[in-house]
Structures are given as structure tokens and as C-alpha cells.
């Protein structure tokens, strides 16, 4: 293993304990987030208002015109909240995937010349996601006041479901992550995939009881990662929600495999970054 790609937690390299390693990775990830955030908006008049506007204007249409697209939903809660909650979970997933690639692309030249732990880059992407998520959550709370709706007590479970959705996005992004250093196709393709695949998951519509779409939703693990947490917010716990836990185990297993893959892929791909 070359000196440049020696793992950061190796005591012979940085003389760090595991705790010191994770502290430095967290600190570096936060600094990378601030660096990119300031760089992107430094030549704008509104500055940090732009990302807030982007997230807000994406979700507001569901609040004001969502009822016209209710697609036959019959429930004790407004369709607008149903669609907005599904949109938030879906957007957290794809924000994680897209922002991880964005951070990898922005830092590819730095990684070519020196070692930067990929986990710090992923943490910087997650910080971007957390910023957007705060805007989405505030928007959902305002919508609940607007429609005079009280979320179910099981909403507290979102403290686990949101991190799991981020972990799902990271599990996918990590496989793409090394290739972003060289090929821009992945960076351009994922936003299109997000727009196309959203209709394979009941984000804006209720899962049909039969037909091809029913089968597609039923065998898609993402259905349960979106539907069940949304039910916990809008309805509460149901006995059928046990299937969420196998989906969670699948996500963790994929993430572990992805971590092993990226450790081997990054040194190879960084050597191929054009100078």
C-alpha cells in the first residue's frame, strides 16, 4: 500500500487512537462542508438563502396544489401531508446520493495529490443533507399547523428512520463514489434516475391493491423504507410494519459491503485521475 493511501487510523502513520481518528474525521467532514457551502454561495447576493429557497420551493407545491393529485387517497389525514412526508423521505435518499457524488467530484484533485479519508467526504455530504432536512422538517411542521393535523406519537421513531434513509443513500453512493473521480456520467445520471424511479415507489400515490404496479411496489425494498416511516408520522404503528426491520437489516448489510468495496476502489481510481 502506498504511503499516500495508507489508512488514516493506522497508528504507525498518524499515531492516532480510534477516538482521535473519528474526532479528526468528524472535524474534517464539517470543515469540508463549510468550505463547499461558502464557495458555492460566496458570489451571490442572497448567500445561504438560496439552498433554503430551493428546498422550500420544491415542497410548497405539495401543500397548495397537492389535493388535485390525490389519486383517490382516502384517509384521516390530508393528501398534502401524505405527499409531503413521502417526498421528504425520498429527497433525503437522493440528496445523500447526489451530494456525496458532488463532494467527491469537487475534491477529486485534492484526493489525487494527498490522502483524504472518504468518510470525511461522506460526512460533508451528510451535513449538506442535514441542512436541507431542517428546511423540510420546518416546512412539514408549518403544513401540519396549516391543516390542523397532529402527528401520531410514533413520530418519535423518525429519530431512527431518517438516519436509516441517509444510510441507504450512502450505501448506494459509496458504490458510485470512486467512479465519480473519472466519469461524470454517474453525476449527471442520478438526478434523472431520481425523477424516473420516484414512480416505482408510492411516494405520491397509495400502493395499489393489484396489477403490475402493485407487484413493483411490493418487491421494492424502498417502498417499506418510505411508506412505513410515513405511516408512523401520520397514522401510528401497525402489526404489518414488521417488514421494516428486514429492510433495515438489508440496508446495513449493503453498507458494510460498500465500505469494503470503497477501500479497495479509491486508491485504484485516484491513480487514474487525469493530471
Image (cartoon, rainbow, N blue to C red):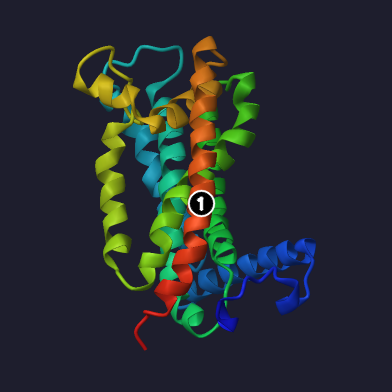
For label 1, count other residues whose C-alpha is less than 10 Å away and answer few (under 14), some (14-19) or many (20+): many
Residue at 24% in and 13% down: 210
Relative height, residue 238 to residue 157 (above, below): above
Residue at 38% in and 72% down: 181
> In the image, is 222 to the left or to the right of 147?
left
- The answer to whether residue 155 shows anywhere in this view is yes
* Residue, far left: 212
Relative depth, front residue between 201 and 60: 201
Residue 110 image point, x, y percent: 50, 81
Relative depth, front residue between 157 and 171: 171
Residue at 78% in and 61% down: 19
Relative height, residue 81 to residue 19 (above, below): above
> In the image, is 23 to the left or to the right of 98?
right
Residue 90 image point, x, y percent: 41, 39
The image quadrant of residue 105 is bottom left
- The answer to whether residue 147 shows anywhere in this view is no
> In the image, is 134 to the left or to the right of 68?
right
Residue 52 image point, x, y percent: 48, 55
Relative height, residue 75 to residue 226 (above, below): above
Residue at 47% in and 57% down: 261
Relative depth, front residue between 4 and 59: 4
What is the total number of numbered labels drawn onto the structure image?
A: 1
Quadrant location, the N terminus: bottom right
The image quadrant of residue 27 is bottom right
> Circle 1 is placed at which residue position?
132
* Residue, far front: 1
Quadrant location, the C terminus: bottom left
Dot 1 falls on a residue whose secondary structure is helix
Residue 104 image point, x, y percent: 45, 68
Amino acid at each position: 500500500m502506498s504511503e499516500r493511501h495508507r489508512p488514516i487510523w493506522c497508528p504507525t502513520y498518524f499515531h492516532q487512537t480510534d477516538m482521535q481518528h473519528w474526532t479528526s474525521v468528524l472535524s474534517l467532514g464539517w470543515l469540508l462542508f463549510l468550505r463547499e457551502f461558502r464557495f458555492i454561495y460566496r458570489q451571490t447576493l442572497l448567500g445561504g438563502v438560496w439552498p433554503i429557497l430551493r428546498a422550500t420551493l420544491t415542497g410548497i407545491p405539495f401543500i397548495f396544489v397537492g389535493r388535485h393529485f390525490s389519486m383517490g387517497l382516502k384517509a384521516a389525514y390530508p393528501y398534502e401531508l401524505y405527499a409531503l412526508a413521502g417526498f421528504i423521505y425520498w429527497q433525503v435518499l437522493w440528496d445523500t446520493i447526489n451530494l456525496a457524488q458532488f463532494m467527491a467530484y469537487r475534491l477529486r484533485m485534492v484526493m489525487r495529490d494527498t490522502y483524504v479519508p472518504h468518510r470525511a467526504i461522506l460526512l460533508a455530504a451528510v451535513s449538506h443533507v442535514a441542512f436541507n432536512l431542517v428546511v423540510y422538517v420546518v416546512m412539514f411542521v408549518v403544513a401540519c399547523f396549516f391543516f390542523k393535523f397532529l402527528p401520531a406519537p410514533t413520530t418519535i421513531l423518525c429519530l431512527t428512520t431518517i438516519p436509516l434513509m441517509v444510510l441507504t443513500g450512502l450505501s448506494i453512493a459509496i458504490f458510485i463514489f470512486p467512479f465519480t473521480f473519472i466519469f461524470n456520467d454517474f453525476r449527471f445520471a442520478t438526478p434523472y434516475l431520481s425523477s424516473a424511479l420516484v414512480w416505482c415507489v408510492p411516494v405520491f400515490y397509495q400502493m395499489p391493491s393489484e396489477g403490475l404496479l402493485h407487484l413493483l411496489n411490493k418487491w421494492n425494498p424502498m417502498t417499506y423504507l418510505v411508506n412505513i416511516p410515513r405511516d408512523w408520522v401520520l397514522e401510528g404503528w401497525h402489526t404489518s410494519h414488521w417488514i421494516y426491520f428486514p429492510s433495515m437489516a438489508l440496508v446495513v448489510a449493503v453498507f458494510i459491503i460498500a465500505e469494503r468495496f470503497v477501500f479497495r476502489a479509491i486508491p485504484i481510481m485516484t491513480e487514474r485521475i487525469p493530471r
